[in-house]
Image (cartoon, rainbow, N blue to C red):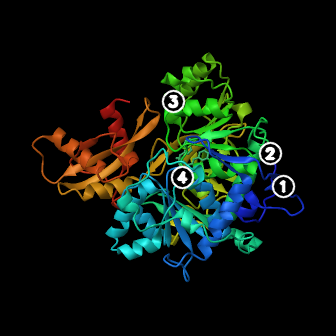
Amino acid sequence: SPYPTVHLPRQSIFTYLLGADPTSPGKIGCYPAAATAFIDAATGTTLTREALRSYALQFAHSLISPPAPLHNPKESEPTLLIFSPNSLAWPILLLGAAAAGYRATLANSAYTPAELAHQYADSGAHLIFAHPSLVGVVRAMLESLGCTEAEIRRRVVVAGSTWLTKSRSEEVGDGSPRDLKGLLTITSFLSRGKLESEVPFSGANSNTTVYMCYSSGTTGKPKGVESTHYNITSVIEILKPAFPPLTPASASPSEFSDVFFGVLPYYHIYGAIKLLQLPLAFGVPVVIMPKFDPSRFCSAVEKYRATVALIVPPILVVFARDEAIARYDLSSLKVLFSGAAPLGAELVAAVTKRLRSVGTNVTITQGYGLTETSPTIALLPVEHASRVGSAGLLLPNLEARLVKEEDGEASSSSNLEGAGELWVRGPTVMKGYLGDPTATAASITPDGWFKTGDIAVRDGDGFFTIVDRRKELIKYKGFQVPPAELESVLLQHPDVTDAAVIGVDSKEEATELPRGYIVPSSPPLKAEEFAKSVQEWVSQRVAPHKRLRGGVVLIDVVPKSAAGKILRRELRERAKQEIGV
Ligand code: 4UV
């Protein structure tokens, strides 16, 4: 990295973000206790730093000594699963879990019962904190695993945020009374006391796992990414030098401060870090909104005078076209930070021009990272935003190599010239994939290099650009779509004998679309109708971001290597011809 090395603390994320120093009363984590930390855009309810700390310690207390009907993990690693759209409950649950010494696994709120079952079973979660609107999915999942009603009641807590917002108007629904019946709510869960501070934590504990987001990595199904306290506190420290200077909130809400805003989901590491923990570390308030809607987004920017918005490229597509842009005062916006997928130069130019035309002088820039690297690896500093398309400079304390395919893994000749697979080493590389030493060994070398599966180039000034992906992963609007998962769904179709799934580019939506290639068990009479029916069949079985929006194509045989590996590159070439790109 071109940046000077920074000092990295060995603290729990709870102390790092919300520590109370007896020598500076009135401050929490070096900012005023009364300063606003989170704002719910739908209701205007705010959570100060003090309230967040207090609720988190209450939550930690309840986790350590759960009420009688709830499951209390005694032997294995205490783990909870959070299944919720963005809400004010998230920072309380995440930081409270950390204060209690729990691991938290964060599940995509669009998951079907089957998808959730994989993460629930794989993570070994003892308790599930579910948003009321998602309790039906949780029930169906637990029932599919053979849980009785009594067991469901011992494992599930209903965790919306109406107890904080004092209003029933959750943007995402309240859940059906039948699903909620008999379950403990977060309010009763929290009502019995509070820890004074987090459970004892020493520097050695900083290598314990605190979060487990799920990522398919370079191949296969989603795996639990073990992120440690040290990974998370380190990523925030190394991001600091690359971030533009920000004005923290004071104790008086009327004074100017920077304001973060975005709809990045908190179950994804990009949102959990950049839109939750990083702003807390910077003392900057965050406006929360669970779903992207152009008018609501613009109206919230106007109302809360948001200065920094965190986004993914498809949101820029909307910005380039939607008339809401012109209806609201967006002049407070200074920076749009994109990430999670490639950012096109034409799109940046179009949105910059459009926003300027409505009086908003905004800089669009981007970061690059992976769940496995906690997540940010590189960031394009705002002052270099004219290098559109570049993922920016390697963050401090990180090392990188660009490994050429022909060099093989053991090569020592890999350097930073030319295109190669980006390998990184440093304090933010995950501990490993939960319970999967084989996958861990395949992605982290014995001397600590993590293989991103992305192909990058680096220019003479040290700026990296991601040019391709070697791994099989598909990204739909920034969300991971593991082809292996869709292939196993397709193989369950009674009339499909073999299947392969790849991503095809949609310039229009600034995303990839999953496209299925299937071998029918017998030639169908109407090929097109059959393909459509299979596409529909998959849609009914997977979360919306995994639908085969790129189409389903019938083929005679799935191209495979001698070892039986799907030759995705051949299919990608074929798709280019079929689609004409
Ligand atoms: O594991 P994951 O789902 O993780 C992410 C993390 C995203 C970011 C983005 C900017 C940040 O500043 C940040 O802190 C976190 O998406 O998917 C990882 C894969 O997504 C692609 C790439 O293929 C990764 O291996 N990807 C992520 N960011 C970019 C990207 C990017 N800026 N440009 C191109 N591809």
Q: Are marks 2 and 3 in contact (CB under 8 Å)?
A: no
Which quadrant of the figure has residue 255?
top right
Distance of label 4 from label 1 (alpha carbons): 27 Å
Which kind of residue does numbered mark 1 sit on?
Answer: Gly
**Disc marking residue 26:** 1
Which kind of residue does numbered mark 2 sit on?
Answer: Ala
Question: How far across and down, in percent of the image, does residue 48 sit?
Answer: 71, 50
> In the picture, which quadrant includes the C terminus?
top left
Which kind of residue does numbered mark 3 sit on?
Answer: Ser
Q: In this figure, which residue is indicated by the disc labeled 4?
A: 162
Distance of label 2 from label 3 (alpha carbons): 30 Å
* Mark 2 surroundings within 10 Å by alpha-carbon count, few (fewer than 14), some (14 through 19), many (20 or more): some
**Disc marking residue 295:** 3
Nearer to us in this view, 208 or 15: 15
Nearer to us in this view, 545 or 60: 60
Residue at 66 percent of width and 44 percent of height: 286
Element class at badge 2: loop
Q: Is residue 570 left or right of residue 261?
A: left
> Which mark lies nearer to you, 4 or 1?
4
Element class at badge 1: loop
Is the residue at mark 2 in contact range of ligand 1, meaning its CB lies under 8 Å from it? no
Name the N-terminal-most of marks 4 and 3: 4
Residue at 54 percent of width and 49 percent of height: 86
Give the total number of marks visible in the rendering: 4
Q: In this figure, which residue is indicated by the disc labeled 2?
A: 251
Distance of label 1 from label 2 (alpha carbons): 10 Å
Question: How far across and down, in percent of the image, does residue 106 sit?
Answer: 52, 59
Name the N-terminal-most of marks 4 and 2: 4
Question: How far across and down, in percent of the image, does residue 579 sit?
Answer: 33, 32
Residue at 74 percent of width and 73 percent of height: 201
Q: Does any portion of residue 107 appear in the rendered image?
A: yes
Q: Are marks 1 and 2 in contact (CB under 8 Å)?
A: yes
